[in-house]
Amino acid sequence: MIETQHAVSWWDEFEQNCERFDAASVAEALSDVIVPGIPSLLLRREAEIAADTVLRHLNRPGSTELAERATMATVRLATTVARLDERVIGDESGTAAAHALVHVLQGRFAAAAAAVEPTIGTGRLLRAFVSALRLESLGTTLALRLLNAGHSPAVAVRSSHALGRYSWWPAWLQEIVSERVLAGTLDNDTIAALKECAFAGLTPTQARMAKRLFNAEPQLVEATASRLENLGEHPAAIKLRRGDVATVAFAARLIPV
């Protein structure tokens, strides 16, 4: 799990590498985790009102009236926070979370995340940003696994978008995809072979054998290659022994149900 504090540029990679970054989603998620950290009840209430006003605008971006209200609410909150800072020297003003919320309301999500990460923690912020990527279920799971394994947001976002289209695959194929992405061993040949398995209509027993063949278990590979030879499929047996994943679906279908 990620524990290190990250720079603004690190958090910025989410939005920079996503074509459909959902500003309303991340703004709402960040507001939900930041607002409770505002110690002053009056300031927290003003922050809640400002966040609700901006979220209404983000969910209806075409409304000029809502845009104007959002701008006014943001300016009002920023002015209040600045006034409180002037009254107190140092960190005693208790406005750190409110400052971060102003970043959110102004669309500076990365700056907000970097500011509150030491107090809120990385995990909750990651979930907020990943939710804004609008990924399929496989993509969401994969993105979080990549990030928690130490990969950059740029890598996590691009990989998850590319592989999210395969969310309809059975769980055992999704597991192979995730494992190979994390290991950095997923290539085009493997994806093509996995697609073959997805369309092969394998039984549960055949699917378990296919997964083991993808993992290149020596005894199973040899036994399956020998079966292929006995069936006259010598070229396929040679390819399987060489580690050619393209033969996995074909070999698995020949395993008795």
Image (spheres, rainbow, N blue to C red):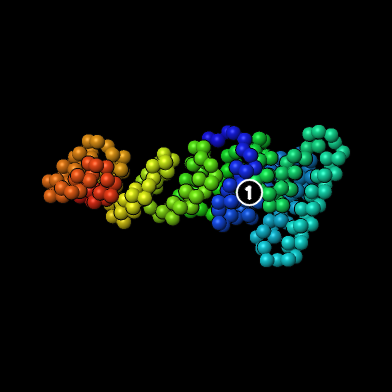
Q: Is residue 211 left or right of residue 37?
A: left
Q: Secondary structure at mark 1?
A: helix
State whether residue 22 is above or below residue 86: below
- Does the rendering let one see residue 94? yes
Horizontal and vertical percent for residue 106? Answer: 72, 52
- For the image shown, how many numbered marks are present on the structure? 1
Residue at the spot x=16%, y=42% of the render? 226
Q: Is residue 2 left or right of residue 233?
A: right
Instruction: Please rate how many residues cluster around mark 1, counting C-alpha atoms within 10 Å: few if below 14, some from 14 to 19, many from 20.
Output: some
Q: Is residue 217 left or right of residue 101?
A: left
Residue at the spot x=71%, y=40% of the render? 37
State whether residue 92 is above or below residue 225: above
Q: Please name the residue that numbered disc 1 is placed on.
A: 29
Residue at the spot x=85%, y=36% of the render? 88
Horizontal and vertical percent for residue 49? Answer: 75, 52
Residue at the spot x=81%, y=44% of the render? 81
Horizontal and vertical percent for residue 145? Answer: 48, 41
Three-letter amino acid code of the residue under disc 1: Ala
Q: Is residue 107 left or right of residue 221?
A: right
- Does the rendering let one see residue 256? no
